[in-house]
Image (tube, helix red, strand yellow):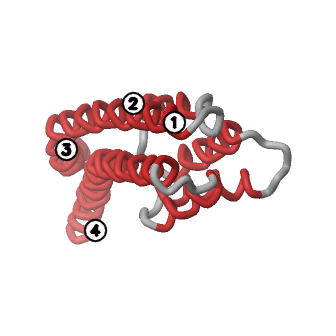
Amino acid sequence: MLWIKIMGSVMLVSALGFWGLAGAHGIGRRSEELKELRFALAFLEKEITYMHTPLTLALERTAAVCHHPIAGFFLESAVKLKAREGLTAGEAWGQGIAWLKTQSHLKSADLEVLNTAAQQLGMSDSSDQRKFLMMIQEEIKVQEEKARQEQRANQKLWSYGGFIMGIVIVLLLI
């Protein structure tokens, strides 16, 4: 009987500890994804501005230099735009954002910054798009710094909090 209680306690503390570690990992992933998104936008800017690459090809090339889920965002946008279903570049970008929302650790404020690009993408000449993409990169950089501050503040709380909560529950059940 004592072994069952001990095993149950260990399992409960382990499960809640794992939950806390997963939450801490998610907080860290957000800042990594924002950093990669910023670099991807810089790559897209160079493709549009200096290489004068058509938007669908520029999105595909950007996807090729990124990792999941950021690569999927650019690829989804390129596929939707390439399908020629009557979507504008902004609408294809918006569908890419909808995909990214389900696949990433980004918050709605991060995605809203990306959504502002949807209105300008493909609607002006390359110099105007360059300025706009640079502005989006700066806004993403601000979001990235906020994510790092949040990570510093909350990562240890999540890491230790799961184990502590598990121990508290075990003590309450004893």
The residue wearing badge 1 is 129
C-alpha gap between disc 4 and disc 3: 32 Å
Q: Which residue sits furthest bottom?
A: 3
Which residue is labeled 4 in the image?
4
Asked which quadrant contains residue 83, the reply is: bottom right
Callout 1, which amino acid? Gln
Circle 3 Cα neighbour tier, 10 Å, few/some/many (<14 / 14–19 / ≥20): many
Q: Which residue bears the numbered disc 3?
A: 155
Residue at image x 74%, y 39%?
A: 88
User: Residue beneath label 2, please?
Assistant: 135
Q: CA distance from mark 2 to mark 4?
A: 59 Å
- Tell me where residue 152 sits by quadrant: top left
Residue nearer the viewer, 125 or 78: 125
**Residue at 60% across / 49% down in the picture?**
99
Q: Which of label 4 and label 3 is nearer to you?
A: 3
Q: Between 117 and 103, which is closer to the camera in this rendering? A: 117
| Residue extending farthest right | 85
Image point (31%, 58%), residue name = 15
Q: Nearer the viewer, residue 140 or 6?
A: 140
Q: Amino acid at mark 3?
A: Gln
Q: Are marks 4 and 3 in contact (CB under 8 Å)?
A: no
